[in-house]
Amino acid sequence: MIIKDARFVISNTDYRKCPQDGRPEYAFIGRSNVGKSSLINMLTNRKGLAMTSSMPGKTQLINHFMINDEWYLVDLPGYGYARRGKDGREQIRKIIDRYIINRAELTSLFLLLDCRHEPQKIDIEFMNWLGEEETPFAIVFTKIDKLSKGALKKNVETYTEELKETWEEIPPIFYSSAEHRLGAEEILNYIEQINKSLYTN
């Protein structure tokens, strides 16, 4: 897939105010500072489409971007940012949960994980919750340029082994580095395949 046009459409905190044109939505989510905005800018080849920041917890809204007048890329708030405080984290959690549970247009979710870290309880719990809600999702390991191939392989194997304890089938896995522009083609081709299946069924 080649992205010819990517533009911001709307930001809000309420899934009911999201676009109502029925186009498929592909949402990106992860813990704060996982590299979500950088990945979105890389995928769309638009340097400032999603706002990047060295400060975690920058995204606090549901952000819709129209891609090629065909589908929406949705930038969801990062979860688990400790400095936001309990009330703030709970507010963000409700925004995320309500969107995922109620948004019929949500076609697939991309869960971003920093490849440098071992499996985090908050991520595993979130994946299990997605499974309970029967939400289709894929895993994207970010910042792969920060690890050797051996260390990356080891960390991914640790994750998949943990997932196998509760999952019969492991979700699709992608690898990305915004800095070295790796992974965009694979992720966009995956989205294109799903879109084609939607329009042929």
Image (cartoon, grey):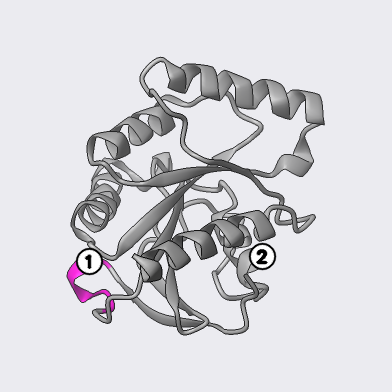
Residue 181 against residue 85 in the figure, above or below = below
Q: Distance between the residues labelled 2 and 1?
A: 26 Å
Query: What is the three-letter code of the residue carrying label 1?
Result: Tyr
Left or right position of 107 against 57: left
Number of numbered labels in the structure image? 2
Amino acid of disc 2: Met
| Residue 42, position as x, y percentages in the image | 66, 65
Q: Residue furthest front?
A: 200
Q: Position of residue 109 (x, y in %)?
A: 41, 52
Q: In front: 192, or 90?
A: 192
195 w.r.t. 65: above or below:
above
Q: Which residue is drawn at 42% across and 33% down?
A: 123
Provide residue 181's location: percent of width, then percent of height.
75, 58
Of the pair 161 and 142, the residue shown nearer to us: 161
Q: Does the magenta-highlighted stretch encompass residue 8?
A: no
In magenta segment, residue 17 = yes
Mark 2 surroundings: few (<14), some (14-19) or many (≥20) residues within 10 A: many
Q: Which of 93 and 188 is in front in this view?
A: 188
Is disc 1 surrounded by few (<14), some (14 to 19) or many (20+) residues within 10 Å?
some
Q: Which residue does the image show at 27% across and 53% down from the upper left?
A: 100
- In the shown orientation, is residue 126 left or right of residue 55? left
Mark yes or no: residue 29 visible: yes
Q: Is residue 181 left or right of residue 126?
A: right
Span shown in magenta = 13-19
* Location of residue 116 (image quadrant): top right
At 18% from the left edge and 70% from the top edge, which residue is drawn?
Answer: 16
Provide the residue designation for mark 1. Answer: 15
Q: Quadrant of residue 195?
A: bottom left
Residue 193 at what x, y percent from top left?
Answer: 51, 60
Secondary structure category for the residue under label 2:
helix
- Would you name the residue on which mark 2 appears? 42
